[in-house]
Image (spheres, grey):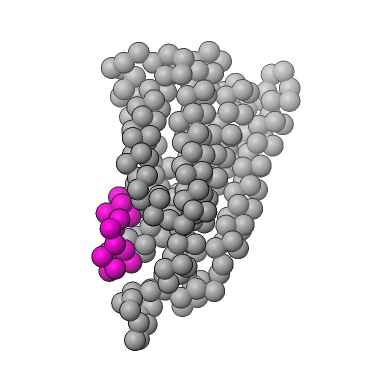
Amino acid sequence: MSVRLTDVANSDLPMTASASMKPGGVFVLACMVSALLLGAGLLQDLLLYSNAKPDLSSKIWLLDVDSEESAFTWLSVVVAFSAAWLLFLASRDAAMRGGRFRYHWYALTVLFLLLSFDEFAGIHEKISAALSGRMEHTGLMYFAWAAPAGILSLIGLAAFIPFIRSFPLALAGLLMLSALIFLGGAVGFEMVGGSVAEVEGIASFRYRILTNLEEGLEMAGILIFIYVLLCHLKRTGVTLHPNA
């Protein structure tokens, strides 16, 4: 997805972008690509574990959603960065309008840039390893970063309630839904997966299924969030155009 900022003469907005793609079309296309890659990874796991002793040496890592080398991880990086770019456009627009929540927009921009970087750099895994040596990490706390991250996320979500309420009711509802779905995958399923990994290992069938569900929920949450962003930008006159 390429985006261009275009100067518009005699406009109240000094910076806008023109668009021909509808938010619904972008959302459906992104969902189809995500479902294709996620389904390919899930199908591979089902086939590999169809035998009592799975031969993991034949695994195609490009299809493994839990691998940093996979196509799904690449898509996750692109999707998170796209959200960051849309947030930047919204931030600039809010700043030019003197909007009350412009700093909320900028904070979300930085957050999604970090999420994009974390998708291939695995920062949360390094944080988890560092925390593991300083706290008890068993059961749901096996991946030590998840619980603290969940608590911080809920505090942050509560702080953004006024920001969310500033949206039309339907978009505000979708914003909450996107956050809950994303956190359900990134934190909830991560914690459940950790308790399974402690007992059965990360190569077990149950852990693989949980990982696919976790990644799918994270992607779904961000895609719903991007749909809300596209609707917001269209509503405020800052929209997307795929051509120069």
Q: Tell me, yes or no, if residue 176 can be seen here.
A: yes
Magenta span contains residue 7:
no
The image shows residue 85, relative to residue 128, as above or below, that is: below
The image shows residue 15, relative to residue 166, as above or below, that is: below
| Viewer-proximal residue among 10 and 124 | 10
| Viewer-proximal residue among 213 and 87 | 87
Magenta span contains residue 103:
yes
Task: Please state the horizontal and vertical placement of residue 175, each as a whole percent of the image.
Answer: 47, 48
Q: Which residue lies at the image location 37% right of the left edge and 44% below the top edge?
A: 161
Task: Please state the horizontal and vertical placement of residue 21, each as a whole percent of the image.
Answer: 55, 69
The image shows residue 160, relative to residue 191, as above or below, that is: below
Task: Please state the horizontal and vertical placement of residue 3, each as a whole percent of the image.
Answer: 44, 68
Q: Tell me, yes or no, if residue 75 can be seen here.
A: no
Q: Which residue lies at the image location 50% right of the left edge and 48% below the top edge?
A: 173
Query: What is the span of residues highlighted in magenta in the rendered image?
Result: 92-107
Dominant secondary structure (helix, strand or loop) of the stretch shown in magenta: helix
| Viewer-proximal residue among 145 and 182 | 182
Q: Which residue lies at the image location 38% right of the left edge and 22% below the top edge?
A: 144
The image shows residue 151, relative to residue 52, as above or below, that is: below
User: How many marks overall?
Assistant: 0
Residue 232 figure quarter? bottom left
Q: In the image, is 33 to the left or to the right of 172?
A: right
Residue 88 figure quarter? bottom left
Task: Please state the horizontal and vertical placement of residue 238, each as a whole percent of the image.
Answer: 41, 70
